[in-house]
Each structure stands twice: as C-alpha cells, then as structure tokens.
Image: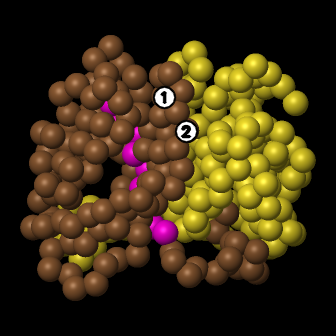
Chain colours: A yellow, B brown
Amino acid sequence: MTFSSPEAAEAAFYSAFEARDLDAMMATWGSGESIVCIHPLAAPLNGRSAVTAGWKSIFEAAEHFSLYTEVAHQMHDATHAIHVVREHLAIGKEAGQRPPILSTNIYRKENDGWHMVLHHASPLHVGAPSISHSPSQVLH
Amino acid sequence: MTFSSPEAAEAAFYSAFEARDLDAMMATWGSGESIVCIHPLAAPLNGRSAVTAGWKSIFEAAEHFSLYTEVAHQMHDATHAIHVVREHLAIGKEAGQRPPILSTNIYRKENDGWHMVLHHASPLHVGAPSISHSPSQVLH
C-alpha cells in the first residue's frame, strides 16, 4: 500500500482501525523496527511484531468499533508530519460514547510513501480538574 | 540557549522541569507557534503562549519535584528525533513515588539547534489489565 500524503496514511489508519482489519492496519505502519505504538495506559510496543500483536488483541476483543476523529493540531515538513487527533470511539453495542482519546500520530516519508512511525494514545478527561489545582491533582 | 543534540535538549528539558525553572523550560521549546504540549489527561496546549502558561501553572502548584527518567525508545534522523520516555516523578513531600508517566518527546533541528516541538505525557498504569482482556477494559 502506498500513501502519497500523511492524510492518506491517516485516513487508512483510522479506516483499518474501525474495520478491525489487521492487514490494512499494518500497511499504514513503517516497515522498519523503529515503530512505536502506545495504547491508552499501556506500555509502549516497539517494532512491527509487537505492534501487530497489540492491534490483533484489540481487534479480537471487540466485535464492532464505531469511530470518528477530529484533528486538534498538525505540523508538517518535507519528511515528517505530526498530527494530534481526538478519537471518539464506541465499542460493541455501547449506547453512549466514551470520553475521547487523544492521540499523537507521527508519519514519516519513506521511499514508498508516507507511513505511521508512532501512535501515542491516551485518555482525555473531559472536565478534569485544571492543571492549576492542588499538587495532589497534578500528575505531571 | 543552543542545544547541539536532541539529548542535550532533553537533558535541559528535564532539568528545567525538576528545577521548576520556567525560562529554562521554555528555552528548550521551538520558537514557532507550531509546538504542542499535552499534560497527563489534559487537552493539548498549542503555541508558546499556551505551553508557557501550562508549565507556569504546574510549577506554581508544587513546591518541589523529584524526577528521574528512563528512555524506552528512540528514533533519530537528520532533522527529527522522537524519544519515548518513562518519567518517575515525586511531588512535594510525597513519601512514595507515583506510577510512571509515559511521554513522547519530539525534537526538531532548527537553525539554532535542536528544540522540543511536542511533549505528550500520559499515565502509565503499571500492572493494568492486558489489552487482550474484555472489550469493557479496552479503551482503544
């Protein structure tokens, strides 16, 4: 699969995610071992073998995904694109939507087009206490 | 401040973080408005003004930080460096350490050396359920 732009790679990534299509998902990732996928709250998965296993587990654990995304921020140059994306995901027959996930997606231009090299997804607490609150609430 | 390598910029970033030194912190960031900082569970902060305000709030909320880091993964090329880092942070007089934070740090080579352009920090749940568990536990 060849992606002529980061946007094409990202569209394919989320399409494969929603379709639970492991081959299509892994076609969006870089070919080398220098790829990293961080699922929410989980330890980083490094390299194609671990990244593939992670998505396989997620796809097998759910019968159905419904997903839409909003781009929060983009940085592009000739060889790299960095997208920050809000993911709104419903799993199975859930009635309501979960709180959004916030993801950093990094794409790199390789000889055969653009591919994802890092996906870092984490929970976004809508209405969470401001970071200016007491130290006990400051996680970072 | 000029950083001749991503490692020098990262060392300065964490040194400024631990010292709660806002000027030193912001010296590690890129000069443009295309910078993004995501604190754990929080919405993305875009641009120098918002990123500065975020760190100011965090530094004012705590009297003391104790911090050490472990690099989990690195990807480097001529113009970009991507580091995935485990941050072990203690705030104030806390006896024990909090669960680690997992951060993606992106550095870009600019005319005046390497600077941070994105910091995405999120909680890492040590001993959290595997992503292969039931869909109700799959956040993503």
Whether residue A13 is visible: yes
- Contact between marks 2 and 1 (CB within 8 A): the answer is yes
Identify the residue at image location x=59%, y=20%: A79
Whether residue A75 is visible: no
User: Would you say B78 lies left or right of A117 here?
Assistant: left
**Residue B75 shows which numbered tag?**
2
Q: Quadrant of residue B75 in the image? A: top right
Q: Nearer the viewer, residue B7 or B37?
A: B7
Magenta-drawn stretch, dominant element (helix, strand or loop): strand
Amino acid type of the residue that numbered disc 1 sits on in the rendered structure: His
Secondary structure, mark 2, is strand
The total of numbered circles placed on residues is 2
> Where residue B15 appears, x then y in whole percent?
21, 50
Identify the residue at image location x=79%, y=61%: A53
Q: Which residues are magenta?
A: B115-124
In the rendered image, which residue does mark 1 sit on? B80
